[in-house]
Image: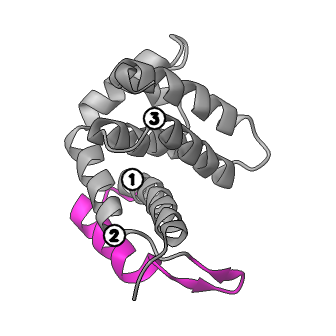
Amino acid sequence: MTISNNQRRKMKSAARLYAVQALFQMEAADMTVDRVMQEFEDHRFGEVFEEGEMTEGDVDHFRTLMGRAVNDQAKIDQMTDRALVAKWPLGRIDPTLRALFRAAGAEMLEGDTPPKVIITEFADVAGAFFPDGKEPRFTSAVLDHMAHAVMPERF
């Protein structure tokens, strides 16, 4: 079966959303990365709800984001802290946004995706979690700052 470019993009977008959820779950439930990844791959990817079916995620992209987010968490957290205003250190940020910044930071460090794509995709993820809030714009601003620091040559 051949996967279209559009379907591939949707699968990567789903992998980003799943990575944010998994990173949040790791922190909230004190789970290991291996355990949470296994749960997501076995039960969440393509899960069917009354409201509809979840998109099948790009497993390789999910694994890459999770691995880098966990292995480079200290570096990513430092990048995020530098992008936040002094009165809002990472520890005061909503745990969902903290997970989002870690997943986005992981993708930035990977270096394969253009920064504008990362910023747009993760601002959309923020919108999925906070549909009526200012979080998508906040996310976009923080990620833009992070991207300029991490990958200035890509702008």
Judged left or right of residue 66, residue 46 is right
Look at the image and give the residue range highlighted in magenta: 29-54
Task: Return the x and y of residue 114 as percentages of the image width and height.
Answer: 43, 39
> In terms of secondary structure, where does tag 1 sit?
helix
Label 3: how many Cα within 10 Å (few below 14, some 14–19, many 20+): many
Q: CA distance from mark 2 to mark 1?
A: 15 Å
Q: Amino acid at mark 3?
A: Pro
Task: Return the x and y of residue 74 as percentages of the image width and height.
Answer: 25, 31
Q: Which mark is residue 23?
A: 1
Q: Badge 3 is on which residue? A: 115
- Closest to the observer: 66 or 111? 111
- Closest to the observer: 144 or 155? 155
Residue displayed at 41% across by 83% down: 2
Residue 55 in magenta stretch: no
Q: Amino acid at mark 2?
A: Val
Which label lies toward us, 3 or 2?
3
Residue displayed at 41% across by 21% down: 81
Tell which residue pokes out farthest to the top in this image: 86
Q: Which mark is residue 59?
A: 2
Q: Amino acid at mark 1?
A: Leu
Name the quadrant of the N terminus.
bottom left
- Closest to the observer: 50 or 53? 53
> In terms of secondary structure, where does tag 2 sit?
helix
Residue displayed at 52% across by 83% down: 47
Nearest to N terminus: mark 2 or mark 1 = 1
Residue 35 in magenta stretch: yes
Task: Return the x and y of residue 121 as percentages of the image width and height.
Answer: 55, 48
Judged left or right of residue 127, residue 120 is left
